[in-house]
Image: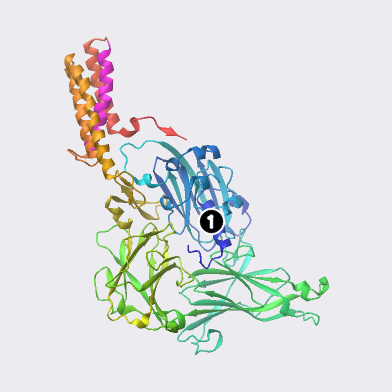
Amino acid sequence: MAENSILCSASSLILSLFTLFSCLFGHGNSIEQLAGYNTFTISSFKYPETQIRPFDMRYIRVDLPPWFSSMSIALKSSVNLDIKSVEKVPKSALPMICFREGSLPLPDVSNTSLGELVALSNSAFDGTQVLQNSEQCYPVPRNMTMKLTNEQISARVLYFGLFNGVGPTRTQSKMIVRGPSYSFAANISVEGCITSSMQGQYCNQTVELLSCGLSRNNSGNGSASGFFNQSMLSCRNNFETSCLGDEEMKIYTLEILRVAEFLTISAENVRLRPVNNSGNSSGIDLMCFVRYGAMPSATLHDFSGNLNKSPLVINSPKVGQWYISILALNLSKETGGSQSNVSKVCYSLELQELECPLGKAGPNCLSERYMLQTVLRKDSTPFESYFLPYGEKVMSDAANFLLEPLLSNYSFGGLDTWTYFILDIPHGAAGGNLHIRLTSDRKLNYEIYVRNGGLPSLVNWDYYYVNKTSNSHGSMFFALYSSSEEKADFYILYVSEGTWNIALRNLNSTDGTSNRQTTMSVSLERCPKRCSYHGDCKSALDASGLTSYSFCACDRTHGGFDCSIEIVSHQGHIWQSIALIASNAAAVLPAFWALRQKAFAEWVIYTSSGISSGLYHACDVGTWCALSFGVLQFFDFWLSFLAVVSTFVYLTTIGEVYKRAIHTVVAILTALMAITKATSCAGPRMLF
């Protein structure tokens, strides 16, 4: 999220708190604690004990609908690490749990250091320490139970990821995967409120749904002065007035269904009741706290203001459920300080939501806005697609479109113009990557701003690109590739579900665009940059089976989430290959000894083992494959096992009849070992 996001820092910190606890999975005591309240179980999942091998991962998705009241989570793992142990474990082997709101976490691009991870141990998962740590990944605890309510967390889709080691080498291909493994089991239970008008942890807080109606178009007067061609949605509380005592709070809810320019919240006809000549309402603080997707409070909110002083304006509010709390303060002071004189303050709450006509957006609703149509790719994996605008201006079946015919021709203030594109990432497609690319025949004259849920602007955006040196490169979910003065090419990694808005700011629009040709491409792809042509793109489902995601399996010399990091240099790879293949010449020594002893059976085994091992390693390092990799691996492991046992059998003093019987049994058993998880038999396994 951009550092100038509309969400306040306190809300972002709390968001980190709830997403951290969300990835700890579990079954708390929500059912027992909520007994007697108007709640019901929305969902309850039990994930059986699952083993995570070295460099492996597991994802789990949890849906929190708007009417949920609490989420109980529990996690039990075989990890037994304290702070001192964590300091000694390299990050590439550290069991970690990561979280992300709206989409899957990707710890390989995180800048989290091991020292920061040590801050949380098995006993350190409390709110204070979490609020001081904004990183996404933490060491896996041995046991954890937690319950979070809709007053603490937003109604969103939460993703948890458990990883056995992170870093560039996690995706690197390895000849033998050897290292520590751990197991985990989890329960997740989500409780909800039976009545939509009652919410909160125990579903005992009344939430009033605002009544809304469409007003006539404005002509330049009123609260939307200077705006034309817009429609105004006006919302009020169901009763004409609401009254609050000192420090009393009332909660309202509003659902924004369409992309809006701004939302104005105001309190009309503020007055004391009963009327008191010694006091007036001008000094009363009628505080308004607003939060997106969750219950607001004085300490946890996205926006706030004193409605008795001025209206609260929220620019480019996100689509979805909004909650508004009104808190009355300083009533005793205004009524003379006497308890007998304490009255209530009454008000009429009014909200105005400005919506532009279809196809319009921006200042004065004169900028062009296009809904992008999803076009599925042929013979592709699920959700792979590209996006094209509706309309007659786009007549191509290609995956890109010409930008200039679609640009807005209105310049607000004569400086620049904005053009907006809207697309939808469907349910379950959060494991894909949004690829945005602009290519021009001359120097690129556009800035790109991207935002989830609402219209982006110079102050409200999630990701942006101005040029090669000014962009969201610091964000862990923004990947910039091969950009230049004539080209912008970047990915939003593991893009969140929902509505995304792309804004193009055309600088110096008075310069004219008739002679310029710029093509734009927007697509939802599996692996970024096709794993940089150094690996294979794999697809999988999360543990719940509700989300499809993709990841790169890199070759022996590359790693990273997109296989772009060179772990072994080309020259080093050559020397490594030579040493690995040539080392099998050591089989000549036991083969020569067996030949001199006229142990022809052992000579055949030693010779065949050396040759098969050389061919297997030549294929494994990518030099040359005489047969398929599986066949070569089987022969290498089988003959190696057989050679060891045959040596001991030859050195025994038992009769030849028994030796032949033992050889036969050993040949069968070693073949079974080699064909069934051969790498697990190659060395001891390490467990936490």
| Number of marks | 1
Looking at the image, residue 225 sits to the left or right of residue 408; the answer is: right
Looking at the image, residue 519 sits to the left or right of residue 507; the answer is: left
Q: In the rendered structure, does residue 683 fall within the stretch colored magenta?
A: no
Q: Which residue lies at the image location 32% right of the left edge and 58% below the top edge?
A: 382
Q: In the rendered structure, does residue 631 fall within the stretch colored magenta?
A: yes
Quadrant position of residue 37: bottom right
Quadrant position of residue 441: bottom left
Quadrant position of residue 223: bottom right
Local crowd at mark 1 within 10 Å, few (<14), some, or many (≥20)? Answer: many
The majority secondary structure of the magenta stretch comes to helix
User: With respect to residue 28, does 421 lie above or below?
Assistant: below
Q: Which stretch appears magenta?
A: 630-652
Color theme of the render = rainbow
Give x and y (percent) for residue 411: 41, 83
Helix, strand or loop at label 1? It is helix
User: With respect to residue 504, does 471 lie above or below?
Assistant: above
**Residue 602 in sight:** yes
Give x and y (percent) for residue 645: 28, 20
* Amino acid type shown at disc 1: Ser
User: With respect to residue 594, does 616 lie above or below?
Assistant: below
Identify residue for label 1: 16
Give x and y (percent) for residue 217: 48, 87
Q: Which residue lies at the image location 33% right of the left edge and 52% below the top edge?
A: 564
Give x and y (percent) for residue 594: 20, 17
**Residue 69 in sight:** no
Decide which of 370, 618 is in the foreground and name it. 618
User: With respect to residue 312, does 203 lie above or below?
Assistant: above
